Amino acid sequence: MALKQLVLKNLDKINGGIIAAAFDKEVQRMALDCEDRPGDKTARTVTLVVKMVPVLVQRDCERLKTTVHVKSASPEYKTGEIDCGLRREGMVTFNPDSEDNVNQGTLLEDEED
């Protein structure tokens, strides 16, 4: 087998193509997040990190211990502020019909879930 140069276009030949597949998967995941939450204008990122540590042979660097990492980051999911009640023993309650007033009554009371 011939040696290959470690360049971007050869990522699919490293470790059975896992790194290239992971990169593609994370790009797709971030694109789907943009599609799912178009109102969140925070950037989504996909990062490919190559780390190299020199291996010295009689004070010369002839080899490298190399690792390749793929990671992504998307904005965290968050709600608006929800008014919650606190009951005994740490029970937190909320009103699904009125997120801004836990004590808001309704005309038609739903059955308990």
Image (cartoon, helix red, strand yellow):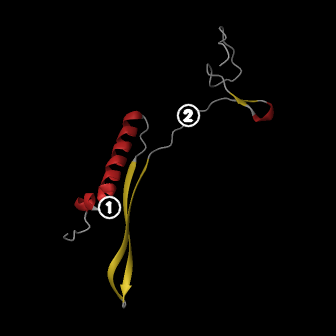
Name of the residue lying farthest toward the bottom: 58
Counting from the top left corner in percent of width and height, residue 105 is at: 69, 14
Three-letter code, disc 2: Thr
Circle 1: element type: helix
Rendering quarter of residue 38: top left
Q: Pick the residue in front: 8 or 41.
A: 8
Classify mark 2: helix, strand or loop.
loop
Q: Quadrant of the C terminus?
A: top right
The spot of residue 11 in percent (x, y) is 27, 60
Residue under label 1, please give it.
15
Name which residue lies at 23% across and 69% down: 5
Q: Amino acid at mark 1?
A: Asn
Q: Quadrant of residue 7?
A: bottom left
- Front position among marks 2 and 1: 1
Give the side of residue 8 with respect to residue 107, left or right.
left
Q: CA distance from mark 2 to mark 1?
A: 41 Å
> Residue 112's quadrant in the figure?
top right
Q: In the picture shown, does residue 3 fall above or below 75? A: below
Q: Residue furthest front?
A: 1
Seen at 29% across and 56% down, the residue is 17
